[in-house]
Image (spheres, helix red, strand yellow):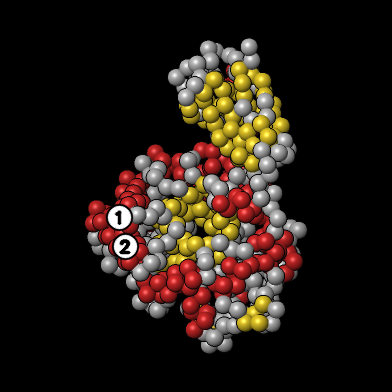
Amino acid sequence: MRGKRRFIVAAMVAGLIGLDAARAAEPPIYLGVDISYANEMDDCGAVYKAGGKTVDQYRFFKSAGANTARIRIWNDPDWTKYSNLADVKRSLRRAKAAGLQVLLDFHYSDDWADGDKQVAPKAWAKLSTPDQAKALYAFTHDTLIELHREGLMPDLVQVGNETNGEIVSSLAKAKEPIHWDRNALLFNAGIKAVRDAGRETGTRPRIMLHIAQPENAEPWFEAATKAGVTDYDIIGLSYYSKWSKRSMAQLGQTINRLRHAYAADVLVVETAYPFTTQNADSSPNLLGEDSLIAGYPATPDGQKRYLVDLTQLVLASGGTGVFYWEPAWVSTRTCGTRWGKGSNWENAAVFDYKGETLGSAEVWLKHAYVLPVEVTFKTRATTDTAFIDGDFLGGVGPRPMTREGDVFVYRTRLMPETSVTVAMAATAAAVAEAPAVTATIGDRAATVPLREQP
């Protein structure tokens, strides 16, 4: 590849890939539910029905098509008996008995950690940063080791929840710029704890880092990379239209850029949509009229179509799945929260106010999605490096290709019948001047090699 070169396109044929096949292949497709409230709901007497018959939450979502349960864990939540280690063990047993994978979500707080707050556990609050890192490592590592001893090792682990701000900090620091030397030390302590626990137990939980709302993700991961936070497997995003400045289309564009910019899968690990704006109790609904998107009314059908369309968008953008946050947090007569009697989310559950399934979960999880096909761009290696650029990258700029023997390759996933224009050169700077070629990814195309033209 001396200077400019011309290329021709050849397509190799492979069979269509279905959703079941995709789940068994790399990358996996995650269709999940965060049902961290499940134990509390059962203790409060919540009843869930499908076809008039009472169902267990975990088994219902498994039968509906979910493959992963997301469970949160707080450090020492002395204000509740839920989401502590004992409660998490109960949840993991139920999830695994139902045949679900588990994503364990460490908040690193005694209470809710989210995009607006990352309050340190009270036991860590007065420690120095190095000692906080040691405490975070120990809590993560020891929790995973104890879970493994009981046959409850999670398949995926979140190092922090919606960590837009500096973790293990305070409400005041949530309004300040992140001190990345400190933040990176803490994140890397958690990441190392997961890797060490996996190595010691002969397992390999995948690590997720999680940012609330897509507009915050790209600057956060750019800063994290510069600070040395790089050893993770999945980028998780929360997407709620109420709190996001990005449209669904822009969410898809963000996912596409992230998955090319970083060596990680990208998925929406939190979303929800109301099936009504009416209230079943005195506790105010968090998702109301301000959460609606044009074309998706607050009806059971609107909720179904939102979930199906969002999931298809995520997958088409190269993402690897969608999780629904608290689809079974319904209103009960006996329980409530610090914010009111009942539930703040019952109008965004996937069960109606009588406990009967709305069909949203079944339609969403079992929909026949059109999946991207695996595509490999390749060219003969005649230099030490090679870079590729094209419209399919979404504007992230030239990406390095990987040398495999006597060729350079770049692997990605593209939707069938997609036309892409690409250019390659020996250096990133030269890509813009390299001749471009256009390729159409046929409905049965699995690879698109680019061969040097004689």
Q: Residue 123 placed where, x, y %?
A: 27, 67
Relative to 204, does residue 395 appear above or below in the rendering? above
Disc 2 on helix, strand or loop? helix
- Amino acid type, label 2: Ile
Q: Quadrant of residue 173?
A: bottom left
Relative to 175, does residue 181 appear above or below in the rendering? above
Q: Quadrant of residue 270?
A: bottom right
For the point 63% across and 49% down, the residue is 315
Determine if residue 70 is in view. Answer: yes
Relative to 113, does residue 403 appear above or below in the rendering? above
For the point 56% across and 22% down, the residue is 379
Q: CA distance from mark 1 to mark 2?
A: 8 Å
240 or 74: nearer the viewer: 74
**Mark drawn on residue 145:** 2
Q: Residue furthest bottom?
A: 334
Which quadrant: the C terminus? top right
Q: N-terminal of the two: label 1 or label 2?
A: 2
Q: Residue 371 placed where, x, y %?
A: 66, 47
Marks 1 and 2 in Cβ contact (< 8 Å): yes
Relative to 431, does residue 366 appear above or below in the rendering? below
Q: Is residue 201 left or right of residue 49?
A: left
Q: Which residue is mark 1?
A: 200
Disc 1 on helix, strand or loop? helix
Q: How many marks?
A: 2
Q: Residue 113 placed where, x, y %?
A: 43, 63
For the point 69% across and 53% down, the residue is 369
Q: Residue 447 placed where, x, y %?
A: 63, 33
